[in-house]
């Protein structure tokens, strides 16, 4: 009838303008500039959604949470913003202002305090001090609901991000804050003085927010997209990439690490840098391997006969031209060269960073076992080129029903998984705490 004059749907609109414009926050869990390109969990999701729609992605960053919602509300006007992808929790209050997609992640709000304070078991235990949360956040909304139980005043800020609040608690500038569990998981390794007091029930669901006035077409398309990436493992893969390896860190480990970074590492840093230069690698990765192997102790020894800073076997040492395994320089050069050699054997189809994780696993458990685990991964319907899948199969190498199917048989398959996890956490710390040369 009058199709020609009808308003385009929100989905048609995006396709016509050939551009998906989203608003987000610049933060570790959402969107930030990585070493070479932008990254962040929300960015990676949005990038894939835009690709699926066949349009280009444009990012607008809001300076605060209230600004995220203003940007959405003003959307019809000039900015043409389609949605907000900003780690947003679905809350009652917000549901009156915006429309949410299906959730893509569950998180828990956690009360964070400085370790020198007494552990609060509940709000009633909070002692007078500074309690700060993000303005307009799901956290502020939750605190309002609990207000009759909270004995001290709390304030909100528009000028900080949650990462700042964590640092401020760590440094004793404030006493309490609330952040989401995913934000804490990703960042607490950098803040040894913060602790979780308790969870603020119930848990929250994170979703994308759309302008209230919008028709359902783009939201439906986003829901389809979420259903698809849940089913095909993309979401799990992204989750592992951003949050996977920090889960099991313990505070003692971080403290010892940072202590040894000042005490032992300076003596060997030079050798790691030389080795990295010779073999075209990041010295901080090599140093992380060295820490995992021996805590940077050149005279380390194990009952199985491996020794030295990089814990080389006699055979490997010989192959790498190491005449004295207890000489730290030789050990570092030899170990790095050996790692390089193993890495070169890893299937060319495996992309970074998975390539590095697989090489580390092979360095730890042996190349043959890694290949076995990759075959098991394939048999089980996983992707043998993805670390997130292969690390599920490695532990099966210690179970007979599985190892009897493999070429190289039994292996302590849990070890390489822990090994890689530890090294990734040390590597994160070193990248955070050292300035590149
Ligand atoms: N999830 C919180 C919120 O919804 C923050 C971290 C964005 O307000």
Image (cartoon, helix red, strand yellow):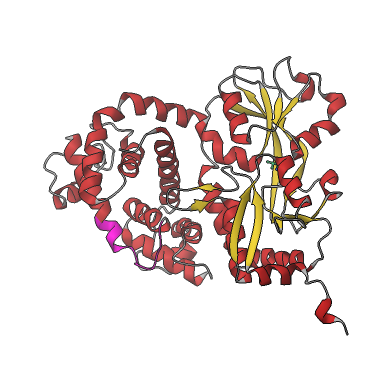
**124 or 28, which is in the foreground?**
28
Q: Quadrant of ligand 1?
A: top right
Q: Is residue 173 above or below residue 98?
A: above
**431 or 422, which is in the foreground?**
431
* Residue at screen point 37% across, 54% down: 356
Q: Is residue 370 above or below residue 263?
A: below
Residue 270: image x %, image y %?
Answer: 23, 34
Residue 90: image x %, image y %?
Answer: 78, 48
Residue 274: image x %, image y %?
Answer: 21, 41
Quadrant of the drawing holding the C terminus: top left
**295 or 315, which is in the foreground?**
295
To which quarter of the image does residue 52 belong? Answer: bottom right
**142 or 86, which is in the foreground?**
86
The magenta-colored residue range is 341-352
* Residue 351 located within the stretch drawn in magenta: yes
Residue 73: image x %, image y %?
Answer: 79, 51
Q: Can the viewer see residue 172 in this picture?
A: yes
Q: Is residue 55 above or below residue 93?
A: below
Outermost residue on the top side: it is 128
* Residue 117 located within the stretch drawn in magenta: no
* Residue at screen point 63% across, 45% down: 25
């Amino acid at each position: 009838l009058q199709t020609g004059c009808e308003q385009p749907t929100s989905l048609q609109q995006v396709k016509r303008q050939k551009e998906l414009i989203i608003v987000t926050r610049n933060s570790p869990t959402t969107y930030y500039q990585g070493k070479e390109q932008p990254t962040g969990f929300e960015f990676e999701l949005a990038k894939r959604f835009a690709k699926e729609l066949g349009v280009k992605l444009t990012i607008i960053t809001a300076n605060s949470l209230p600004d995220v919602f203003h940007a959405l509300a003003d959307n019809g006007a000039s900015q043409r913003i389609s949605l907000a992808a900003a780690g947003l929790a679905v809350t009652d209050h917000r549901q009156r202002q915006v429309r949410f997609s299906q959730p893509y992640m569950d998180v828990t709000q956690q009360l964070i305090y400085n370790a020198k304070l007494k552990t609060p078991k509940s709000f009633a235990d909070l002692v007078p001090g500074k309690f700060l949360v993000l303005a307009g956040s799901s956290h502020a909304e939750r605190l309002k609901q609990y207000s009759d139980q909270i004995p001290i005043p709390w304030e909100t800020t528009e000028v900080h991000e949650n990462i700042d609040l964590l640092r401020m608690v760590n440094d004793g500038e404030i006493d309490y804050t609330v952040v989401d569990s995913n934000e804490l998981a990703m960042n607490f390794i950098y803040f040894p003085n913060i602790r979780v007091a308790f969870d603020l029930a119930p848990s929250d669901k994170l979703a994308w927010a759309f302008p209230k006035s919008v028709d359902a077409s783009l939201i439906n398309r986003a829901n389809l997209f979420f259903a698809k990436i849940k089913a095909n493992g993309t979401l799990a893969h992204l989750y592992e990439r951003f949050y996977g390896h920090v889960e099991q860190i313990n505070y003692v480990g971080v403290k010892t690490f940072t202590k040894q970074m000042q005490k032992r590492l300076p003596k060997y840093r030079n050798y790691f840098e030389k080795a990295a230069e010779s073999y075209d690698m990041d010295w901080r990765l090599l140093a992380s391997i060295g820490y995992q192997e021996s805590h940077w102790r050149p005279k380390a020894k194990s009952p199985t006969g491996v020794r030295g800073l990089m814990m080389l076997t006699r055979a490997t040492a010989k192959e790498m031209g190491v005449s004295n395994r207890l000489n730290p320089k030789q050990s570092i050069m030899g170990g790095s060269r050996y790692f390089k050699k193993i890495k070169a054997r890893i299937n060319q189809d495996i992309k970074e960073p998975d390539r590095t994780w697989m090489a580390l696993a092979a360095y730890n458990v042996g190349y043959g076992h890694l290949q076995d685990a990759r075959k098991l991964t394939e048999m089980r319907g996983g992707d043998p080129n993805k670390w997130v899948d292969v690390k599920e199969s490695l532990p099966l190498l210690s179970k007979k029903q599985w190892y009897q199917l493999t070429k190289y048989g039994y292996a302590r398959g849990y070890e390489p998984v822990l090994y890689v996890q530890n090294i990734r956490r040390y590597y994160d710390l070193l990248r955070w705490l050292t300035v590149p040369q």
